[in-house]
Image (spheres, rainbow, N blue to C red):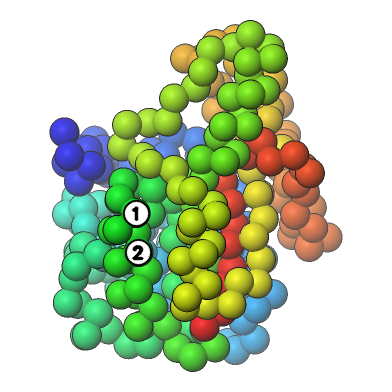
Amino acid sequence: MKNKDYWNLRAKKNKQTIKSTTNFNLIKEFEISILKYLFEKYLKKKSLKILELGCGNGVNLKSLKTIFPKFEFYGIDYSKEMIKHAKKNNNNINFIEADITKTNIYNELPKFDVIFTNRCLINLKSGNKINLAISKSEYLLKKGGYFIFLENFIDGHKNQNKLRKVLKLRYRKIAKFNKFLDERSFLNFLKKYFKILENVNYSSLNDLLLYVLTPSNSLKINYNSKLQKKLIFLLINLLEKNKFLLTLNYNSGQNNLIVCKK
């Protein structure tokens, strides 16, 4: 099954719910709080244009529109079903069905103050397609604008499995519809277009608990345990009230936050 077919089927089944894009609804709450924190940190204007690449069924943009009602939000996704349900879920957001690696729709769009991805690039499963998506969409970013990536990286995933091995847990495979990014090569490519302002492994503590300390084997991951909920609440609370992103020195998380400026 092609990735596009997989996401179409998933959206058809789960419609406007968060399960269309992820089984881990708690991490989505955390990532929305991260984006809110970054927008408040870097964006000083009250009315801005924001684009999400790989917007799925619009869950991220719906939450962000509630927080920043004066911002103008756009979302692009290649899944017809995802865009269908995104439009049903969000009347005041601009959604476009298009392939971010080869669409000509970019010529019809405005310039943006921020472009971001949230586990979008890992679904392209090709370094060449990832580079195309970034190089094409970079054209849409205003001079001085920000490109924000919340993506999965193989480096942290490997470290997770090293820790799992110590605890005699089985190797945890990457989902077949994902291909995690190589951090070094990805950063080197970004440097061709942007100045890199931040690179933070934001899921290190979360993933240590979720994938290493609590599972009994690789097939049983409890995404909504009471302990996991407490941790996410703590991470969000620290970020919103103290502007502090709690991480570990050891890279045990597979999710990195990278902020770039054009």
**Residue type of the residue flagged with mark 2:** Asn
Residue 177 in the image: above or below residue 112: above
Residue 32 in the image: above or below residue 260: above
Residue displayed at 59% across by 52% down: 256
Q: Quadrant of the N terminus?
A: top left
Residue to which mark 2 is pinned: 131
Q: How many marks?
A: 2
> What kind of element bears circle 2?
helix
Residue 88 visible? The answer is no
In terms of image quadrants, where is residue 103? bottom left
Residue to which mark 1 is pinned: 127
Q: Position of residue 197 (x, y in %)?
A: 65, 72
Residue displayed at 79% across by 44% down: 249
Residue displayed at 49% across by 48% down: 182
Residue displayed at 40% across by 73% down: 51
Q: Nearer the viewer, residue 256 or 52?
A: 256
